[in-house]
Amino acid sequence: MLDMDYLNRLEEYFNNGDCKFEFDNGDETKRHEILDFLEKLMDLSEIADELATKLIFKDGLNAMLGAREH
């Protein structure tokens, strides 16, 4: 499920200007598709940020509680 290769390709697609080029030169359907994709990606990034915070906090809390037990 965790595909870092895909994320790296996506990062390159954004950074090298291909996404902007496709948007600038695409028809209305393509532009709408790109905007929908970016909106979904931004929604997922918010979820990922929240999850990462919870996971880090949980690990930190567990470490702190483990340290108290010793």
Image (tube, grey):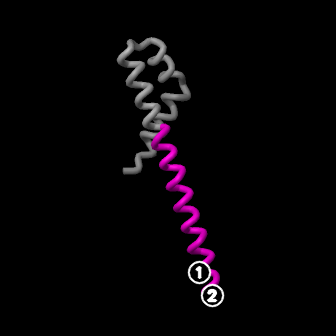
Q: Position of residue 25 (x, y in %)?
A: 45, 12
Residue extent of the magenta highlight = 42-70
The residue nearer to you, when weighing 16 against 53, is: 53
Q: Label 1: how many residues lie within 10 Å, few (<14), some (14-19) or many (20+)?
A: few
Marks 2 & 1, CB-CB < 8 Å contact:
yes
With respect to residue 37, does 45 lie above or below?
below
Q: Is residue 67 left or right of residue 18?
A: right
Secondary-structure class at tag 2? loop
Three-letter amino acid code of the residue under disc 1: Gly
Q: Position of residue 59 (x, y in %)?
A: 56, 68
Dividing the picture into quadrants, the one containing residue 62 is bottom right
Q: Residue at x 53, y 55 (%)?
A: 52
With respect to residue 16, does 65 lie above or below?
below
Residue bearing the label numbered 2: 70
Is residue 22 one of those drawn in magenta? no
Three-letter amino acid code of the residue under disc 2: His
Secondary structure, magenta segment, majority class: helix
Dividing the picture into quadrants, the one containing residue 6 is top left
Residue bearing the label numbered 1: 66
The residue nearer to you, when weighing 5 against 46, is: 46
Q: Position of residue 35 (x, y in %)?
A: 44, 26
